[in-house]
Amino acid sequence: MKTKSLLILFIAIIIGISEATAREYSGFFNFTYNEDDGKVELAIKQLDTEFLYVTSLASGVGSNDLGLDRGKLTGTHVVKFVKAGNKLLLTEVNYDYRASSSNLDEVKAVDDAFATSVLWGFTISKEENGTYYVDATDFLLEDRGRVAATLQGSYKLEKSRSAIYQDGLRSFPKNSEFEAILTFTGKPTGRLVGTVTPSADAVTIRQHHSFIELPDDNYKRREFDPRAGYGGISYMDYATPIDEPIMKRFIRRHRLEKKDPNAAISEPVEPIIYYVDRGAPEPIKSALIEGASWWNQAFEAAGFKNGFIVKEMPEGADMLDVRYNVIQWVHRSTRGWSYGSSVTDPRTGEILKGHVSLGSLRIRQDFMIAQGLISPYGTDAKEVERAKEMALARIRQLGAHEVGHTIGLSHAYSSSSEGRTSVMDYPQPLVKVTDGEIDLSEAYDDKIGEWDKVSIAYGYSQFPEGTDEKAELKKILSKSMENGLSFLSDATSANGVHPYTHQWDNGENPYDELLRMMEIRKIALSNFGENTIPAGTPYATLENVLVPIYYFHRYQITASAKVLGGLNYRYALKGGDQFIAKMVPAEEQKKALDALLAALTPEALAIPENILELIPPQPMGYYRSQAENVKSKTGTTFDPLSAAEALANMVFSTITDSRRAQRMLEYHSRNAELPGLNSVLDEIISATWKAEKLDGYYGELQKVVDNSFLTYLAALATDKVASTEVKAIAWLKLQDLLLYTTQKYATSSGSIKAHYGYAMSRITQFEKDPEKFEITREVMPPQGAPIGME
């Protein structure tokens, strides 16, 4: 009896050990993880059945410049397992080229014309009752996110230091989740990797894989209209009649359906729910929930009651689980971009998961801007709270903005010129002056915009049965145009064409807002000093706060420059009742040039002496950052002349952009009233080189501006992209300057004579050998963005 009991105990122990070392996961895909050898065995029942394969980073590197962030989505693929002999090939289907036809031969002709991609080949280890078993370990340990190629240096995946991450293994009815620890070894190029890793020769992250069931066929696609503000999918459909466009375009959006399709307002069958990262601290977490929840205003206007909900992430839930739309709080060593990404069905454009990543350091930059604007560390403690509230207001708006991308929307850069009609613009804080004091109370919006309601109505409205959907959608856009709303998204930013679609700008027109912002900047600088930083802070750190205030008007400057040679246009469709394109009137271009030149006067460029006296070199333990501070030519001291040079370089680089120069030349030839390149350059020369020279600090600032313009004028004359006509005009202006500086050199003395003499030598050198002419444009303002990005 005793022997039998021991035998039973022994068998139980063996079974227990087996259970402990091999864990089974049941769900969309069944698989087993064996602790003894660290391998994942995948069970595959259905062959030739498409599903979605998504890769992402479960942990990041922590550098904005590298872009390898926690939660980053790195790939979305429609795949299927195809049996070939003793292998199962994981094959990606090519949905960029299709034939929407009932003729199977026609479909096959297209399928055979374009390549597919076999992502991996699995050797079948066994087959039982139609289920195939394969070892998926090596596949899961592949560098699917191209981390090695993204790291700066010579890195490769080191399999001996990589393994399956058991805590990241899960399987649910409609999705299976896998995770792996990947280590990359090598030598870095530069210092970026070394600043964020314990050892720069070994970088370890976690990579996530998701196998996801594709949705049913009940989703109804909605046609893309460039005026509606949506991103989309596109593909070539070779079954299209020859008199119709072969390229098909549909918007990206979530599936949202009314319980009662015929009701004007109805609860949804399933609301869109977003979850905020539990790792976001308060009061930031509450601000994110509040800002993201603004979208419910737009969905209510589109006929959905409680159609959009925002909650805190459930405890224990995984942010990378496809079942959750998430707002993730991401940490980096430096401030960086925020992203609104999506997992989208490539076949239809249906968004299956919204995935927002918000950079945690951005709020500190906004607080620093408020800090520089109001210098809050005086006797009134409420001033610091005012600065904090502006930063939190920005977080609310940022949360709404990035969520907007994940529900399908694109940037709406024209909204700032129409009265802040969209949270999808990049917003500059709208700072006002009340009774001579800086007012931050309306710095950022506190609600969804009117254009946002139009976009959601276009993308998500559900119409009663029998409705002509296309006609109703056209009515939505036509009504918005009648109300003065528009959608424009300018990807080319500073060197773009449209004068009212700039990023980080404000105001009905750029140049009046530039002059207004210069007055705000002047007030902020007049108050700048000891009360700008808290007690116990090194005075040298005043420079960090000074930079965003000194360049507070930087984006309004580049927005104003876009008025020169600007084209006001719309994404007009035939029969769409919108004007197509108009050149910006001469009067507006003249005002823009005057405002830009006003920003370069010595009075505008000078930093008050009382501020300069408070900024010593950085103390031990602190350092200057090229990303955040002005490049100095004076060693370790703050360099106000280089600060001014950076501003001048920014102005002249945008004005003399060869594409803008070509448009000025062309538009003037078509309409003589418009300022041409010749007259614009003449006005700049009159305001800079030909202006009466002053003494002292103001005089040195004038010389900085003069030399900056000379550099960019020479650059335009040798620009390889510029037309011969543009280069000819720039060359002529250099000759005019040579003649003028030669005359002034003969009648000047001291440093003014040196200024003119050096200009003469530079232009003479340029004439002899333009290719060897030294064009130094390295001094530019430190980065002011990012504040948000798709």
Image (cartoon, helix red, strand yellow):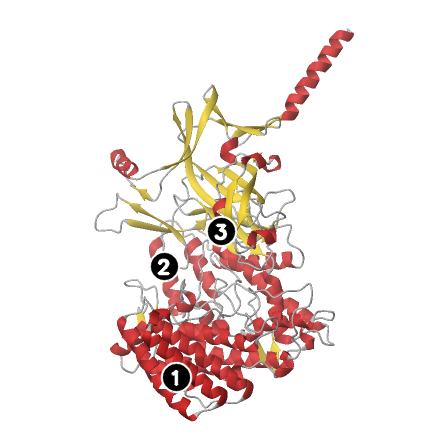
Relative to 27, is 581 on the left or the right?
left
Relative to 750, is 436 on the left or the right?
right
* Comparing labels 3 and 1, the label whose residue is closer to the camera: 1
Q: Position of residue 739 (x, y in %)?
A: 34, 86
Q: Can you tell which mark lies on residue 685?
A: 1
Which of marks 2 and 3 precedes in the sequence? 2
Element carrying mark 3: strand
Q: Position of residue 116 (x, y in %)?
A: 35, 37
The amino acid sitting under disc 3 is Ser
Q: Position of residue 495 (x, y in %)?
A: 40, 68
* Comparing labels 2 and 1, the label whose residue is closer to the camera: 1
Which of marks 1 and 2 precedes in the sequence? 2
- For the point 39% across and 80% down, the residue is 761
Q: Is residue 10 above or below residue 73?
A: above
* Comparing labels 3 and 2, the label whose residue is closer to the camera: 3
Element carrying mark 2: loop
Dot 3 corresponds to which residue?
341
Dot 2 corresponds to which residue?
226
Element carrying mark 1: helix
